[in-house]
Image (spheres, rainbow, N blue to C red):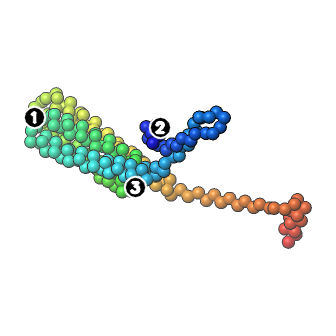
């Protein structure tokens, strides 16, 4: 145990201290070794991805619950919360897309979730518009506007997803046929000259 333990943890290093037998007597030399963190990186990636999947699933469950409540209570606030949940889940799908290594699987999952959010947003919009028409409440119309924005933003995210996947596909299909042939001659200039003369005659 060295006096550098908290620093070592923060910098992800291991330290050892050697006392030098130089005339400076007592000078301290530190040897740093970087720990292999590749397993930790993979573990963090898997944890983050699983957490994002869980957040999306819980968001969908919350949206289902608030949509049911909104239908039963005819409350503008319930519809407003539905719009907020739609936005939160759509933002979380963006994070999944940004962190993903399993592009195809996460693309399909994200795409289906965005479609679901858009459909539920449309249901929510229909419900609040019906409520606004019956109550003539300015608040209900305000909530309708918020839901429209949430659904439009989610639709935008679907289009961004398509664009990103298209870019990834194009990058994967680009093949570069760069062939570099380097010939190296080892010998004297007179030998090179002889070889070139023979090559032109033969």
Q: Residue at x 12, y 35 (%)?
A: 75
Residue 40: x %, y % from top left:
42, 50
Crowdedness near tag 3: few (<14), some (14–19) or many (≥20) residues, C-alpha within 10 Å:
few
Using the image as rendered, state which of residue 116 and residue 102 is in the foreground.
102
Q: Residue at x 9, y 42 (%)?
A: 72
- Who comes first in sequence, dot 1 or dot 2? 2
Q: Quadrant of the C terminus?
A: bottom right
Crowdedness near tag 2: few (<14), some (14–19) or many (≥20) residues, C-alpha within 10 Å:
few
**Disc 2 designates what residue?**
4
Residue sitting at the far top? 138
**Disc 3 designates what residue?**
102
Residue 123 appears in the figure = no
Residue 82 in the figure: left or right of residue 38: left
Between circles 2 and 3, the one closer to the viewer is 2
Q: Element under label 3?
A: loop
- Who comes first in sequence, dot 2 or dot 3? 2
Residue 199: x %, y % from top left:
84, 68
Crowdedness near tag 1: few (<14), some (14–19) or many (≥20) residues, C-alpha within 10 Å:
few
- Compared to 90, does 101 lie above or below? below
Using the image as rendered, state which of residue 11 and residue 93 is in the foreground.
11
- Who comes first in sequence, dot 1 or dot 3? 3
Whether the residues at callouts 1 and 3 have beta carbons within 8 Å, the answer is no
* Label 2, label 3: how far apart the Cα atoms are: 39 Å
Q: Element under label 2?
A: loop
**Disc 1 designates what residue?**
134
Q: Quadrant of the N terminus?
A: top left
Q: Element under label 1?
A: helix
Q: Residue at x 28, y 39 (%)?
A: 87
Whether the residues at callouts 1 and 2 have beta carbons within 8 Å, the answer is no
Residue 152: x %, y % from top left:
30, 40
Residue 170 appears in the figure = yes
Q: Residue at x 53, y 46 (%)?
A: 33
């Amino acid at each position: 145990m060295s006096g550098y333990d908290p620093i070592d943890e923060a910098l992800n290093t291991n330290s050892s201290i050697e006392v030098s037998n130089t005339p400076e007597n007592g000078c301290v030399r530190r040897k740093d070794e970087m720990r292999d963190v590749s397993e930790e990186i993979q573990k963090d990636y898997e944890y983050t991805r699983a957490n994002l999947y869980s957040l999306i699933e819980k968001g969908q469950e919350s949206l289902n619950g608030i949509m049911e409540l909104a239908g039963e209570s005819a409350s503008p606030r319930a519809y407003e919360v539905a719009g907020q949940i739609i936005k939160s889940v759509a933002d979380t799908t963006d994070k999944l897309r940004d962190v993903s290594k399993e592009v195809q699987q996460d693309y399909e999952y994200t795409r289906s979730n965005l479609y679901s959010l858009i459909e539920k947003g449309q249901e929510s919009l229909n419900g609040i518009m019906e409520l606004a028409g019956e109550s003539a409440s300015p608040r209900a119309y305000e909530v309708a506007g918020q839901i429209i924005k949430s659904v439009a933003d989610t639709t935008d995210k679907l289009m961004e997803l398509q664009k990103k996947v298209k870019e990834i596909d194009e990058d994967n299909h680009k093949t570069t046929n760069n062939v570099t042939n380097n010939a190296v001659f080892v010998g004297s200039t007179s030998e090179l000259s002889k070889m070139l003369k023979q090559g032109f005659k033969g």
